[in-house]
Image (tube, grey):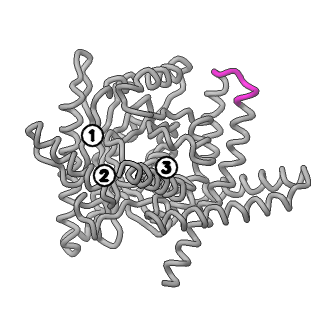
Amino acid sequence: MMKKILLTVYGHLIVTSICINVAFDLAIGIFLKLSLPSELFLKATSYLIDFTTPIVYGLPLAYSKVFLAKSDVDLLVEAKAKDSLLLANHGSRIDWMIAMFAGHLKKLSTREVNRCRVGFVCEALLQFMPLIGWYRKIVCKDIFVWRSFGRDESTIKKNISEFKTLEVQRMLFLSPEGVIVDHGEHDQRYIQECREFSLQNGMKPFEYVLTPRYKGTNCLLEQGKTVISVCLVYVRNNKLLNCKLLSEDERVVPDIYDLTQGIDVYIHLRRIEVSDDSFDAKTVLFREYAWKDEVLKAWDEKLAKPSVFADRNDNFTQLRINKMEILLGQLAHVLFIGGVAVYFERVGLLLKAIGLTFLMVSFTHTFGCVFESSKESVPFETGIKAMLAFIQRFSFKIRTSKTA
């Protein structure tokens, strides 16, 4: 029990550090937006993002390891060198952090590779999440989808076109599943709906992934011809965390707090061939998700025999964190933030802000865990989503009582 409490407090400290650092970088981003024309702003933010990225993934990944299949190294190198589109399964709340880390790498094993800007297509609610959400919206100019790829097509095309016109290279990352399922009644219902949809379309239901949303995805192909299918595998203590969707007692949806406690992440890649003439999104995406389902099934079966699968890392290249760069990045932020506080004689205010942020992080996460479970893909999300769910349930009860 004490260990769990200490790990949670450690997680609170990590999230607080991210909040404080990103808050100052967000202030720089807002200043640049107000000071520069749009074309210069977009290019300038690439440097700011490069400065911010290590302090976002650095501490959470300190006790985790990320591996890439050796056969897929060239594909990642290619994705980082040009405009690319990566389509990944959505078995965790830390996919985005793994993508940022992979994009920021300058060394793959012994090879020097391009460091690239990573953008995301994500649910619209995230842009309203304090600090990280605002930063991704204002500075990173991610694509936020309100309804579906089809209905938000104009927004997606406009965003991609802006980057293309200004020749700002980007690796665009998204999960066609669109949602993450936990263990609630609504989640179980959605899993069943996905299975029924597969059966209705003459396909075998997936066991480890949800059915992808394919309508309107063709507009994403304007990002570039390098389209890569990504399967992320999460392992801890020789157990597959993103195991079968209906494995209620075993399946874990990793978030930032899980990441700080140590997870092994394995990345599988494979190219999706894109035709200039036609692209049948439904056929292609369902084929890729069948592949991801088989990859995860193979991992699940092999991990059940740990002695047989002890040499699994032989087929993978570890993507190593540059700890010196992380340390220097943290130090640069500490000196910058501390220097600003000293210059304006607001050291006391800074310390109060850090303490208040820690309390807010601790309270919102604890509140969310009491009513729901830890869902921290970005700071404060656990508490905010638990509050929204509580309001939704309360409103439903009121409407039901009035009609009774």
Closer mark to the observer between disc 3 and disc 2: 3
**Residue 8 is a magenta residue:** no
Q: From mark 1 to mark 2, how far is it between C-alphas? A: 24 Å
**Picture coordinates of residue 372 (x, y %)?**
44, 63
- Magenta stretch, main secondary structure class: helix
Q: Give the range drawn in magenta.
A: 33-39
- Residue in the picture at 58% in, 51% down: 54
Residue 120, visible in the rendered structure: yes
- Residue in the picture at 15% in, 45% down: 196
Residue 110, visible in the rendered structure: no
**Picture coordinates of residue 147 (x, y %)?**
40, 33
**Picture coordinates of residue 287 (x, y %)?**
18, 38
Q: What residue type is labelled 2?
A: Ala
Where is mark 1, residue-wise?
Answer: 212
Label placed on residue 101: 3
Neighbours of disc 2 within 10 Å: few (<14), some (14-19), many (20+): some
**Picture coordinates of residue 86 (x, y %)?**
36, 37
Which residue is at the front of the view, 366 or 72?
Answer: 366
Classify 381 as above or below 134: below
User: Please, what secondary structure does the residue beneath circle 2 have?
Assistant: strand
Q: From mark 3 to mark 2, how far is it between C-alphas? A: 16 Å
Classify 90 as above or below 348: above
Where is mark 2, residue-wise?
Answer: 69
Q: What residue type is labelled 3?
A: Phe
Q: What residue type is labelled 1?
A: Pro
- Residue in the picture at 19% in, 57% down: 297
- CB under 8 Å between discs 1 and 2: no
- Picture quadrant of residue 88: top left
Which residue is at the front of the view, 316 or 180?
Answer: 180
> Is residue 209 rendered to the left or right of residue 381?
left
